[in-house]
Amino acid sequence: MLVDNLEKINQEIRLACQKAARSDNDVTMIAVTKSVGNDSAKELAELGIKNMAENRVDKLLEKKEALKNFSSIKWHLIGNLQRRKVKSIINEIDYFHALDSLKLAEEIQKRSEKQISCFVEVNVTGEASKHGFRSEEVFDFINQLAEFDRIKVVGLMTMAPLDASEQVLHEVFSQLKKLQLAINNQHLSYAPCTELSMGMSNDFPIAIEEGATFVRIGTAIFRGA
């Protein structure tokens, strides 16, 4: 079942890339394993999945330990991170997708032993229930990171409203793309901002059409499995 689901997802990625005149090599699928156990995650690794994500610190550490024989896996923390947990996780991950405050950046700078690839979380729609900076706050925040040599802003991340129409999804994702390009055009060594982490199981084809380079997919992988 996992093989079939992965093939269907890869086909949707290819079609979305064709529609946008992009190469499917430009899009990385991250398998979000938060809803499954270690055995299912291990099965994905055996199928060649190289990028895995969790939204909780304890679950990521547990999965990473269970899959320690798969050394090529890149680990992504996609959930919001409490400052008190930074010390236990920051040196165990390759990407952090939810940088949403200066205080969190300061804690990462303090605790990290390497440069961490981070996505700045942007609340494009301004929903009260979501974390992240408003679009107009992002430039100021990134400017404040100039001296943080443990943080590399590789891109921006957002989550679209769950019940959004296709039109709204296109608008949300295209707004983040415009913001990413504007930051990229600043040519900041510590914030190249070449990537876009956006799109989940229900909306990733639209995210890809609008420029996503990382899509975070969980439900669609494990559906029926």
Image (tube, rainbow, N blue to C red):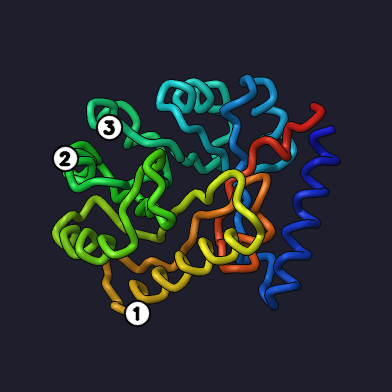
- Disc 3: CA contacts within 10 A as few (<14), some (14-19) or many (>=20): some
Q: Are marks 3 and 2 in contact (CB under 8 Å)?
A: yes
User: Residue 200, percent across and down?
Assistant: 61, 47
User: Residue 104, percent across and down?
Assistant: 23, 41
- Determine the residue positioned at 53% across, 25% down: 63
> Residue 86, which numbered label?
3
Q: What secondary structure is found at the residue carrying circle 2?
A: helix
Q: Are marks 1 and 3 in contact (CB under 8 Å)?
A: no
Identify the residue position indicated by label 2 in the image.
110
- Determine the residue positioned at 19% across, 48% down: 102
Relative to 85, say whether 72 is above or below.
Answer: below
- Determine the residue positioned at 50% across, 28% down: 64
Quarter of the image for residue 34 reads top right
What amino acid type should be assigned to the residue bearing mark 1?
Asn
Quadrant of the frame with the N terminus: top right
Question: Which of pointers 3 and 2 lies earlier in the amino acid sequence?
Answer: 3
> Is there any visible trace of residue 50 in the rendered image?
no
What amino acid type should be assigned to the residue bearing mark 2?
Lys
Identify the residue position indicated by label 1 in the image.
185
